[in-house]
Amino acid sequence: MRRWLLPESIEDLLPDEARQVEQLRRALLDDFALHGYELVVPPLIEHIESLLTGSGRDMDLRTFKLVDQLSGRTMGLRADITPQVARIDSHLLNRNGVVRLCYCGPVVHALPSGFNVTREPIQLGAELYGHAGIEADVELVQLLLGALDLAHAPLARIDFGHVGVFRALASRLVSPSLRDEDGRQDLFAALQAKDMPSLHQLLAAELVEVRDAFLALPGLYGKMEVLARARAVLPDWPDIRSALDELAQLGAAIDPRVSGFDLADLRGYHYHSGVTFAAYCAGQAQAIALGGRYDEVGRAFGRARPATGFSLDLRQLAQLAPRAGARSAILAPHAGDDALRQCVRRLRDAGEVVIATLPGHDEDVHELACSRQLLFVEGEWRVVPLERKV
């Protein structure tokens, strides 16, 4: 076996890609800071009970597990940073008011989340704790849209859903086969796939009102008018009314040219507790960012806190953003007098990239991204165009 080969769906980031990712990371985290979001850095590995608290069995299947040789307990490499940030809010910060946190770091997936997708995303996100109103969700969506605009990502649309609709209907199911976890998962999967034959089969024994409402969900997608259709075809129950009202408020606050609704999009059903959203870029089938409300995760940590947020894969975003060219560097002699050293320091303090040549590597200068050089001209060090040898 070739020792330099990496595992499947694990890749290096080479200089151009790494520079693109790092520039985006700095720009986005700085932008989040301007909105009051404080940076946290959770550990890459934790006890498995903490990592999976409130996240559902789908995250369990995606988490690498190992045994801690110090304690003998099972530990996991994080597959999602959001539960860790919820733990920090619940037990370390212990603030009573609104808390805004952001983060960026690698996560590891036991299985790729899609075709040609890395198993080591760089997850960047923002979370808001302590406010249960739709205003918090609006703020997070606007922060996400601002981040995509800052990255010059070609946003196509952002779709909104609400797990409250599914939960309201699921609470009225009467078939024993659909009331246990496996049956509920089958129904959830059929709705996600908009598999109408399977839905008809699964719901055959349900009350007509509940069955018809479930069968209507896959067709309830589109622009703002879909909410009016939803009010007409879904039961007029308080919990469904409340969910549709929240979606209407969210839609009214977001640019209608990019916002839409999909009431059958239930990804993260076990994790989310209210509004959900997914942002898509032009020409991409997979969402660039996912988010929504997840109040129950804080409850699972022993401190009930309203929570909403979003995350994205910085690697994926960097591939969609316009390529940032390498900065033109200045070539400088390896050794020189104090005047040369002071000149190099002034240039670097001004933000210039200055690369020192090393003895014996004159022939390799063409591999460096230099367009200028430092030469001693008329008694002083000057920056002049670099002359390439033919």
Image (cartoon, rainbow, N blue to C red):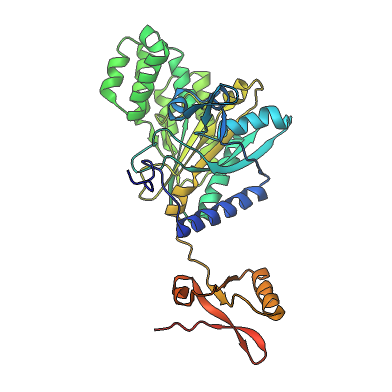
Quarter of the rendering containing residue 215: top left
Q: Quadrant of residue 302?
A: top right
Q: Quadrant of residue 84?
A: top right
Q: Quadrant of the N terminus?
A: top left
Which percent across, then down, holds residue 139? 60, 41
Q: Is residue 132 visible?
A: no
Q: Is residue 143 above or below residue 347?
A: above
- Residue 222, percent from left and from top: 39, 38
Q: Looking at this rendering, what residue extends furthest in the bottom direction? A: 378
**What is the x, y in percent for residue 66?**
49, 27
Residue 244 in the image, given as x and y percentages of width and height: 50, 29
Label count reads: 0
The residue positioned 54% from the left and 79% from the top of the image is 372
> Between 72 and 255, which is closer to the camera in this rendering?
72
Judging depth in this view, the residue of 293 and 85 nearest the camera is 85
Please indicate whether residue 4 sits to the left or right of residue 310 in the image.
left
Q: In the rendered view, would you say 115 is above or below 21? A: above
Outermost residue toward the left in this view: 197
Q: Is residue 277 left or right of residue 42?
A: left
